[in-house]
Image (cartoon, rainbow, N blue to C red):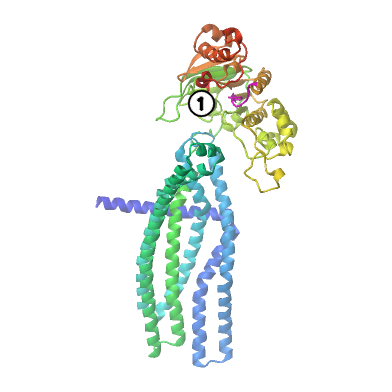
Amino acid sequence: MHERGHMKDDTRHEEGSLRARAWTAATLAWQAQPRTTACSVIVSVLMGIAPVVTAWLTKVVLDGIGRGSGASELVPAAGALATAGLVLIVLPHVSEYLRGRLHRSLRAHVSGRLYGRVNDDPGLGRFENPAFHDDLRLAQEAGQNAPDRIVRSSLSIGQGTLTLVGFVGTLIVISPVMVALILFAAMPSARAQLLLSRRRAKMLWGISTNSRRQFFYSSLLSSPEAAKEVRLFGLGDHLRGRMLGELAAINAAEEDVERRTLHSQGLLSLLGAVIAGAGLLWAILAAADGALSIGDVSVFIAAVAGVQTALNTIVGQWADAHNALLVFGRYLKVMRADPLLPVPADPVPLPALRKGIELRDVWFRYDEGHPWVLRGVDLFIPYGVSVALVGLNGAGKSTLVKLLCRLYDPVRGSIHWDGVDLREASPDELRRRIGAVFQDYMSYDLTAAENIMLGDLASGGDRAAVEDAARRAGVHDVLAALPRGYDTLLSRIFFGDNDEEEAGVMLSGGQWQRLALARALMRDRQDLLILDEPSSGLDAEAEHAIHLGLRTHRAGRTSVLISHRLGAVREADLIVVLGGGRIAERGTHDELMALDGEYARLFTLQASGYESAAPGGGRNATSQDADPPKIDSPAQLPLHG
């Protein structure tokens, strides 16, 4: 009994949840297209009533003919019947147009709300969580179709209900017994449809992982990034086999649901046909005995067909709506999720940086299942000072940069901007004060000018500012020499949309890195400049030129530089060595070399690779104080991060 009570509570909870979701879908439709939604309701009402009216008008005309009525009596009824027939012909086309219009508007409205909600989360935590990407993909799929399916099915259910009520009333007048039989035969069909709907939704969730894997393997087989290794290592057949294996699992699950649908619905349809045939036989015999008129027989036949059609429509549309309501829950889950990074309701204004940025006992880890990345970091970045962060992989350099941009909050401790705790300030205002280039920079499928302009939308795409940033990043000559200059599309994914000249150009990795640096330099007059490995993909000459320019550019500005090439950071005002999540050393290059600690060991280790490769091979072949050129030596590898 106790377990049964729980089952009833769960059922009530599910029904209440589904009703709430249906109301949400209706609200979204009204917000997207109020007039179209209202017109769709009116048309559905007319389409629900029209078959019943047509059946009764047909009865009136046939009975009048049977009685030998004159034209004066028959013409009004015949005219009304013709009008009803015209309505039945025209209204489905009007309905389809309205539904298409509503579908397009609703899809745009729902997608806009979804990605607006995603964009409202100012942090990175959700985006670096694989589970969120599963939820987002399902929410996107649900948002594209589920609300529209719910609204369409609801309108069809309303239309079918009106038709059903009208024809049930008709049958009650003629044969109450036949009404009971038809409704009794429809009950198993309704239950079977609901069970199949749940099974179909469960199947879709069950094959979600298979679908992701199938897409993953197929993308590897067609990706230009993976093509070299796929061919070199002979991975094609292996990946193709895995893709087909996942596809086989998807097909098997879908086949199982379709087989069950065919089995149940086929038997139930046969039962409905037997009952309809029995009713028709009874009506004919009753008419032969004089118990029914010709008009009664015609309206009875129309009513039996109409009741069964309406019941099938209601049950089928309810099953589809039920499935859509279950799927719609994934959309609502993303929409109702609170941001992981809290935004203050009344943020404290962030002053222009004049004193500095202070990290106070900062501890951080990405979640409770991961180790601490930062362990009690205390650091002051004075205004107008260039600070370099160095250390081995996993030392916490890039994580510290994420905290400075408030893409995450410290688990313990705090970060202050001229005394203001970053948690109390608006993340948007903070980020408007920061220019940054990240190690994993973006390559946008846009024009060269747009790629740079994105660094400062407030500039309005000022071409002079864009070109100035490109010059300082050392990429102006490359972009100016493109077929359409700065207006050249830096992508080939739109090939075929325009003529060959406008099909797009691909840049090299080093050129893309300079372009990303130019994007960061669009905000060069902001309070803080963050450079995370700004030259890791450049050749030795380009790297030297970039860092030479950046030294001049950073002079007198607050900046944070991360680089595994220690020759690039030696001119920083302050060098901070991270190790084990803590600050191991801090000071200028000369101070740290004199300390003969971790920094001196890493610098000497890296420099020794250049010295041994120089002509003559001696230690004096290259000055330890000179900026070493870029080489791909094993000595560099521990410092890359």
The residue sitting at the left extreme is 1
Determine crowd level at label 1: few under 14, some 14-19, many 20+ residues with C-alpha closer than 10 A. some
At a point 38% along the width and 72% down the height, the residue shown is 272
Q: Is residue 121 above or below residue 151?
A: above
Residue 45 is inside the magenta segment? no
User: Residue 464 or 309: which is nearer the viewer?
Assistant: 464
Place of residue 141 in the rendered image (x, y in percent of width and height, measured from the top left): 50, 50
Residue 435 shows in the view? yes
Residue denoted by label 1: 399
The single residue placed furthest to the right in the displayed view is 464
Percent coordinates x, y for residue 239 in the rendering: 46, 43
As rendered, which of 218 and 367 lies closer to the eye?
218
Q: Position of residue 493 (x, y in %)?
A: 62, 44
| Kind of residue at disc 1 | Thr
Closer to the camera in the image, 593 or 283: 593
Residue 16 visible here: no
Q: Residue 536: within the magenta?
A: yes
Q: Residue at x 32, y 54 (%)?
A: 8
The answer to whether residue 536 is left or right of residue 461 is left
Q: Which residues are magenta?
A: 531-540
Magenta stretch, overall SS = loop
